Image (cartoon, rainbow, N blue to C red):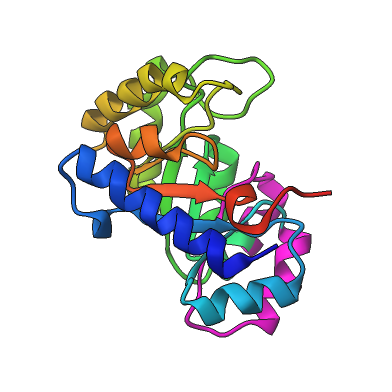
Amino acid sequence: MDLAANYRQITESIRRAADEAQRDPATVQLVAVTKTVPLDALREAYDLGLRHFGESKWQEAEPKIAALPADITWHFIGKLQSNKARKVAEAFQVIHTLETESQLKEIAKASRPIDGLIEINIAKEIQKSGIFPETLDDFVQSVLYCKNVRLCGLMTVGPVEVDPERMRGYYKELRGLLAHVPTGSWLSMGMSHDFGVAIQEGATHIRVGTALFGSRS
């Protein structure tokens, strides 16, 4: 794995997608998905200039956060169990996967606020996390009421599609839903295989793991 070459390629792909959408590439934040990635690779990514890392499990993230420099912004991007929500809120700066009142109740007990995104189950897949679009307005009010969450926008994990173009409609729909979030401008959408389409449709945060670190075992 040539991490430096992968990073250059991703950066160039971000630039091209942003140019096609007549956007400034600087408006797209690359979140390096580091779940199952060893600490040495994270250190190499840090040395290349990456400062936004995404983890899915508290138990795996805790030692990485402790071992790495304090100027990293940690994004929680996995399913957030309510009994871990307070710990996650005190260790991570951003939580992408807000979806329940019980999460908010625990986050409210944390010692500091976090930036939060509401996860939308955009394709209404029963096996996926996230709220359905029609319940967004009510949940927005709950998040706004939580004193430890700065509501920044929306996130989605779309269906697994081989052709990135098949994701375009879902990403357009998520962008439209952002109008229901009075305090938000962030759209966390797009992963290794489809982040170009996501950027063209307005993504502000893309979550890239495989394209950067290679396939996981």
Judging depth in this view, the residue of 23 and 137 nearest the camera is 23
The spot of residue 185 in percent (x, y) is 25, 45
Locate residue 173 relative to residue 42 in the image: left or right.
Answer: left
Task: State the image quarter where residue 197 is shown.
Answer: top left
* Farthest right residue in view: 217
**Vertical position of residue 21 compared to residue 60: above or below:** above
The residue lying at 58 percent from left, 22 percent from top is: 162
The spot of residue 148 in percent (x, y) is 42, 59
The residue lying at 46 percent from left, 54 percent from top is: 10
The residue lying at 64 percent from left, 45 percent from top is: 78
Viewer can see residue 109: no
Locate residue 137 relative to residue 91 in the image: left or right.
Answer: left
Judging depth in this view, the residue of 33 and 185 nearest the camera is 33
The spot of residue 106 in percent (x, y) is 59, 53
Locate residue 63 relative to residue 155 in the image: left or right.
Answer: right
- The quadrant the N terminus occupies is bottom right
**Vertical position of residue 21 compared to residue 112: above or below:** above
Task: State the image quarter where residue 144 is shown.
Answer: top left
Which residues lie in the magenta part?
58-87
